[in-house]
Image (spheres, rainbow, N blue to C red):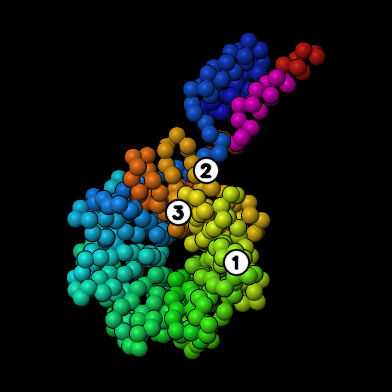
Amino acid sequence: MKATIVAMFCCMAFWRSRTMRRSILVIALVLLTAIPIHADIMYNVVDLGGLGGTRAGPDSQAGSINNSGQIVGFAINPSGKHRATLFDSTGNGNNTNLGVLNGDYSDASAINDNGQIVGTAHNNVPIGRATIFDPTGAGNNIDLGTLGGNSSSAFSNNDSSQIVGHAVRNVGDYHAAIFDPSGGGNNTDLGTLGGSNSVAYANNNGGQIVGFAENTFGNRIATLFDPTGGGSNLNLGTLVGGSSSTANSINDNGLIVGDSKYFANQNHAVLFDPTGGGNNIDLGALAGFSNSVAYSINNFNQIVGFSSGGPSRATLFDPTGGWDNIDLNTLIDPTLGWDLYFAHGINDSGWIVGWGENPSGDYHAYLLKPVPVPGAVVLGSLGLGMAGWLCRKKDEKEELK
């Protein structure tokens, strides 16, 4: 930054004196070498920490971020217990344990733009129940009930407090559901595609709901659910040659992403045809990787997830299906020592959350924040080279006089 400003200054303000210009350029070059500059650094990494506990797997994971930058997921507490967590997005560690439902486990899956947090918590049986969490951590959590069975989970909520997930029915199967946010139990069964089970993973502010449902063959197929519960669910299909698929996210434009099996029983991220016409777009994976999943799409159609077939890599997908996908690890400062494994959520500011391995070898939730581009760096990648070239041209003009 300083080097670029000095270089521009030397050209614009001191071009009359060749000696002065060259002196300033030397100073600028010294500054440039003193300041590490990585042209491809697009994100700063924030270690979101945890709740003070550790285990063999991840100590924390971030699963959702809203447009205010509030982040939820889970972390391990000092007793080694899995707890729904509202993370401090500054990375200062002031994370909030969101508690349970008199049980010993909880996980926060989503937070809407009103700050409402939903997920799953164990009751005293212990059995998991769809839950609205008290964001203060005071424990006034709401059990959202089931569809007549004993367990349920909430995975997404829109800004109108439409909460979706799945619940067990009294016959033992589980169905996608819309939960009564009051906890009164007036939950809506969203049905299937003719099979036994279904799950709703995401909804948008238009009330559209996606996930998967089993068809009559028992295959899990990405589904756009009828929100009335009338059963007019839309089969979104698979990739060519695939037998199963899942829709993981839908944005307010109605674009749906997820994953599908395809030839050779591999799995690829997908942008689904929302009409159900089957014109689904294979988003591919990172070069050299065989499998991928798209977890989240924001309202600017940015898509994140991961690629695997080796160590998993957090991935920013090319929405055109051109397979020009980007390993998010290549867009952060490599000297930080982070390995970003999974990207689970992205908001409309382009903030990305997920989990990976930090420089200490701990598996932690992270936040990626786009690096600000100040107006002073209007030259961007041209930087000092362009400034030097401009000054050289000034010299050449003077020599011709």
Q: CA distance from mark 1 to mark 3?
A: 22 Å
Q: Quadrant of the C terminus?
A: top right
Q: Residue at x 54, y 58 (%)?
A: 291
- Judge by depth and name the residue closer to the eye, 10 or 55: 55
Mark 1–mark 2 Cα distance, whole angstroms, equals 29 Å
Q: Which residue is mark 2?
A: 331
Name the residue that disc number 1 marks. Answer: 262
Dot 3, how many residues are within 10 Å of its Cα: few (below 14), some (14-19), or many (20+)?
many
Disc 3 to disc 2: CB gap under 8 Å: no
Q: Counting residues from the N terminus, which is met first, the one under dot 1 or under dot 3?
A: 1
Q: Is residue 32 left or right of residue 68?
A: right
Residue 262 figure quarter:
bottom right
Gap between marks 3 and 2, in whole Å? 14 Å
Q: Is residue 62 left or right of residue 203?
A: left
Residue in view at x 52 percent, y 39 percent: 41
Q: Secondary structure at mark 1?
A: loop
Task: Please identify the quarter of the rendering in which residue 21 is found.
Answer: top right
User: What number is the disc on residue 161?
Assistant: none
User: Dominant secondary structure of the magenta stretch?
Assistant: helix
Q: Are marks 1 and 2 in contact (CB under 8 Å)?
A: no
Extent of the magenta region: 380-394
- Which kind of residue does numbered mark 3 sit on? Phe
Badge 3 or badge 2: first in the primary sequence: 2
Q: Is residue 37 magenta?
A: no
Amino acid under disc 2? Leu
Observer-nearest of 168 and 41 = 168
Q: Give neighbour class at mark 1: few <14, some 14-19, many 20+ (Cα, 10 Å).
A: some
In the rendered image of this protein, does residue 250 appear above or below residue 359? below
